[in-house]
Amino acid sequence: MPLSASTQIDRKKYERLLAWAAELEDFAYLGSTGSGHNHGSLRGFTGCAVERVCVEPNTDLLETDSLASKMESLARQFSLPDSDVRNILTGGWIGLLSYEFGYAREKRLAGENQMASTPLLYAGLYLWAASHNVESDTYHLWLHPECPSKTRTLINFWLDNETPNRLESWKIPVGFTATQIASDFKTSASKVLRYITAGDCYQANLSQEFTARYSGNPWFAFQKLAEANPTPYSAFLKTPTRSVLSISPERFLEITDRTVKTSPIKGTRPRGITTEQDAALAQELLAS
């Protein structure tokens, strides 16, 4: 099998590719947007998956071993010899895994998931990617040797043509509302405290869902959120039926070769009365 092709491109072509790719119904962007501190050292995007896997939210019980084997088998079909591509984004599986995935994985919890509306798992297998290495300020286009000719033709068209001018907007006419009433949330918090007291667990991630209707382009909203809240672990995923915006400050897992790193958020501190106190508390937390 021939080696993959990595071509250095200029910023204008990168931004042109990005503008066109963001129009796809199947588009994935990893990393933050904009420049400056805390935006990360690498970001990039792709689209036009050659394979997709979707586990719908109403799935009762899932054979995760067979699902993993299927995805690994598909990835192996497009495996390449080792090459030095550490500083650029290459293709592969990109997607999302919902917290509610555990309900479909554990037999004891099967059927308990009544609230999820997002797929428990959605992933696409991609054979091209464009990326920006912020540290070297270089832009790259990576193509797998088996990237479909239809996708290659589309990419060449994007490189040669300016994107149409579109008026970007995003608006939420009415504020977010909680899907869980306050009394139910307080009841859940009391249960967690009892579990901790009983020794059944030592911590729990108690959260709730908020919903709102919007108008406009979710990709535009993601860019504005990433600028306002810079973090290197942002991501935007658009599927044929929904978009997912993630502006997370936390690196959950990083896997390089056989090394796994985790950097969970350490915790929070109360706000100070003055700006100086806020800065001191932040530094104390960073040093903890």
Image (cartoon, rainbow, N blue to C red):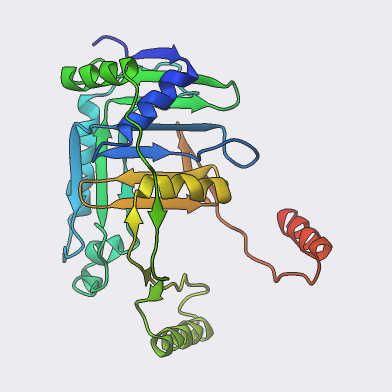
The image quarter containing residue 53 is top left
Picture coordinates of residue 156, whole percent (x, y)? 28, 15
- Report the front residue among 106 and 140: 140
Q: Position of residue 213 (x, y in %)?
A: 32, 65
Residue found at the very far top of the displayed protein: 2
The quadrant of the image that shows the N terminus is top left
Q: Is residue 175 visible?
A: yes
Q: 71 or 123: nearer the eye?
A: 123
Residue displayed at 26% across by 57% down: 120
Residue 73 in the image: state x and y as whole percent.
19, 34
- Horizontally, residue 169 falls left or right of residue 198, namely left
Number of numbered discs present? 0
Q: Quadrant of residue 238?
A: top left
Question: Does residue 146 appear anywhere in the picture?
Answer: no
The answer to whether 93 is drawn above or below residue 4 in the figure is below
At x 36%, y 50%, the residue is 218
Choose between 76 and 55: the one closer to the eye: 55
Is residue 67 placed above or below 194 in the rendered structure? above
Name the image quarter holding residue 23.
top left
Above or below, comparing residue 220 to residue 47 in the picture? below
Q: Quadrant of the C terminus?
A: bottom right
- Residue at the image position 36 percent from the left and 80 percent from the top: 180
> x and y percent of residue 56 in the render?
18, 58
Residues 198 and 143: in front is 143
**Residue that lies at the very extreme toward the right in this rendered image:** 276
The answer to whether residue 159 is above or below residue 226 is above
Q: Is residue 269 left or right of residue 61?
A: right
